[in-house]
Amino acid sequence: MTNAFEVKDLMFTYPKNDKATIKGVSFEVEEGKIFGLLGPSGAGKSTTQKILTKLLDKYEGSITYFGKDLKSYQKEFYEEVGVGFEMPVHFNKLTAMENLQYFAGLYKKNIDYVDLLTKVGLFEARNQNVGEYSKGMKVRLNFVRALLNDPKMIFLDEPTAGLDPKNAKILKDLILGYKKQGKTIFITTHLMGDVEQLCDHVVFITGGIIGETSTVRDLKMKYGKKEVKVEYVENDQLLEVVFPLQNIGKDEAFLKLLESKTIETIHSGETTLEDIFIKVTGDEFHG
Ligand SMILES: Nc1ncnc2c1ncn2[C@@H]1O[C@H](COP(=O)(O)OP(=O)(O)O)[C@@H](O)[C@H]1O
Ligand SMILES: [Mg+2]
């Protein structure tokens, strides 16, 4: 097992701020895996990505990239790293093709970007000025841009934000395909659907503080509970109540409810990642 990144006791304060934005975080990103940095808005996800991609360098703590100090890498670093920014800046007066031609020209190695543009559904709009693109089209173009140099290490900051489910799925399938090719992927997100479908390892960041890295499965084992949700009608109102699945047959409140109310639906399920997200980022790291 090789680690693409090893981050230890990372601290970072923006020059204009007096308080640190990243307050001593440590984690490892394994080669060939999809690592998800999760957290609410303002948690420090984009800042962390900017540090790992060498856009912010006045940090404390240590970061290695494939065993070598990140600071020892120069321009060659960007030949093998692809970066999808959260707020993409494109040339609005140029077409998608012109934008891609320009950015592809910055690298020694290029992919067949017309092919990728086609896969993300932008072929028809390839000669349209990007200024006329919708938000979702810009997000997809940004994705193509991040892959232009066929990077072995891919950073994607909120890659599916603003996409409809169909286009989000196309991007997620592409991301899974890149993982199959052995690429390492670092994504930041607050969308739990993405996490569930993509991530091998995840870590929560809240207020610049990070928890322990775990797998999605372990997270669900730790926080997830099997439960039964019952919807019933009372005084013309639809109400909902949740019971633990364990020993449900002896749960008196549950049995009484079945007997005495008009039941609309009964569903069994497990605690969703959404619930886990709120639980973990809501109470644990704020204190
Ligand atoms: N250029 C900047 N200068 C000063 N503070 C910043 C800058 N960029 C982000 N911040 C602050 O750092 C914190 C983390 O931001 P960010 O990393 O963008 O969070 P996230 O990506 O998790 O939403 C926020 O409080 C934000 O206001
Ligand atoms: Mg962000």
Image (tube, rainbow, N blue to C red):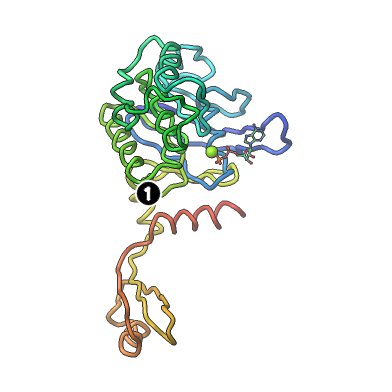
How many numbered marks, from 0 up? Answer: 1
Quadrant location of ligand 1?
top right
Q: Position of residue 51 (x, y in %)?
A: 55, 28
Q: Determine which quarter of the picture holds residue 119.
A: top left
Residue 41 against residue 183 in the figure, above or below: below
Image quadrant for the N terminus? top left
Which quadrant holds the C terminus? bottom right
Q: Position of residue 211 (x, y in %)?
A: 50, 46
Q: Where is 258 relative to 230, above or below?
A: below
Dot 1 falls on a residue whose secondary structure is: helix
The crowd level at tag 1 (other Cα within 10 Å; few <14, some 14-19, many 20+) is few
Cβ at disc 1 under 8 Å from ligand 2: no
Q: Position of residue 135 (x, y in %)?
A: 47, 37
Tell me the residue at 51%/31% (across/down).
Answer: 49
Figure quadrant of residue 156? top left
Residue at image coords 56%, 47%: 206
**Measuring 27% from the left and 32% from the top, which residue is drawn there?**
177
| 125 vs 279, nearest the viewer | 125
Residue 200 appears in the picture as rendered: no
**Of all residues shown, which one is farthest toward the top?**
108
The quadrant holding residue 31 is top left
Residue 106 place in picture, x, y as percent: 45, 12
Q: Is residue 148 left or right of residue 281?
A: left
Q: Is residue 161 visible?
A: yes
Amino acid under label 1?
A: Gly
Which residue is under mark 1?
193
Residue drawn at (54%, 27%), measured in percent from left and top? 62
